[in-house]
Amino acid sequence: MIFQQLKGRVTQIALGKSMTSCILAAEGEISFSKYRKYRSRLRMLNKEFKNSDSYMQNLYEICLRYLSPVNSPIALISQIQRSGGSLLSQLFDGHPELHAHPHELKIGYPKKYIWPRIDMSEKPERWFEVLFEDSVIRDFKEGYKKGQRQVQTYPFIFLPSLQRRIFLHFISSLEAVTLRDVFDGYMTSYFSAWLNNQNSSGEKKFISAFTPRLSMLKENMELFFEIYPDGRLISVIRDPKNWFPSAHRHQTKRKKYDEIKSALRQWAESAQAMLRNKERYDT
């Protein structure tokens, strides 16, 4: 009796194993098919990821292939700080006939308010080092914002290595390089390496850019108009009664506007420079 029960039980187990094997075999074919597709896709993705370096090279080549030279003159906004220059620069942002530099133009060397002197006997790599604006690295990593006190930031997709390649490519494509070519090459490389620039297309008449105090030095203006005889200089004057509280409140650690008499002498220097530049260059 017990033997018959065990025999029946074994038969049921054997039958169950047989049925399970059939089911697993059918499901296995489906699962293996899905696995093959997954593995094929995974191999494709891994291959694509490993090609990231070649993609960067492709990006460089595409940018160079469709390069649009930026040879417009600069419309420079410059005067003493806290006079409204950065606001005016922002109002130009997005104008369809302007390449608007997004922040302060910091090509000055060795300081931003000293117009850079380019030695044409040096190599193009050195020209680029002199003109390069370090701030693009920070803005690319941390995002761009209009002012230091602003909270909202915007993505600023800018590749310094691409800018350098474009600059060297631009210079090497010229038979004879002039001083203006160096600056045109830099502006071409800057706006071409700024990949998410929303105002890159269309015919541009000027490059709008703001740098405080640059116009206050006579030597700066001589160099600027030597390179850009077709350029423009825009200087904003602000009532000193309103200017001093703003300058005093926003001054840097150097405390340039801490004492009112010293601050007003600097304001007067800026105003006198406007009169001098207007008389000499009639901009």
Image (tube, grey):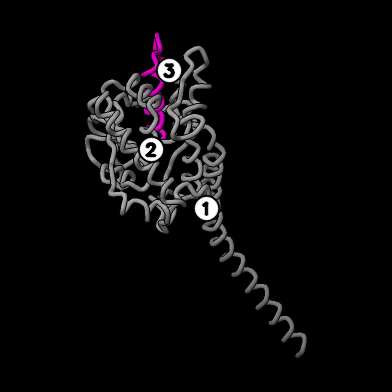
* Residue 131 in view in this figure: yes
Residue at (54, 34) in percent of width and height: 53
Can you say whether 151 is above or below 262 in the image? below
Residue 278 position in % (x across, y down): 25, 29
Residue at (69, 81) in percent of width and height: 9
Q: Amino acid at mark 2?
A: Thr
Q: Circle 2 sits on which residue?
A: 211
Magenta highlight on residue 182:
yes
Secondary structure under the numbered disc 3 in the rendered image? helix
Q: Are marks 2 and 1 in contact (CB under 8 Å)?
A: no
Q: Amino acid at mark 3?
A: Ile
Can you say whether 103 is above or below 147 in the image? above
Instruction: Tell whether 38 sits left or right of 203.
Output: right
Residue at (54, 62) in percent of width and height: 27
Can you say whether 197 is above or below 24 in the image? above
Q: Circle 3 sits on which residue?
A: 171
* Residue 64 in view in this figure: no
Res 229 → quadrant: top left
Task: Give the magenta range.
Answer: 171-196
Secondary structure under the numbered disc 1 in the rendered image? helix
Q: Earlier in the sequence, mark 2 or mark 1?
A: 1
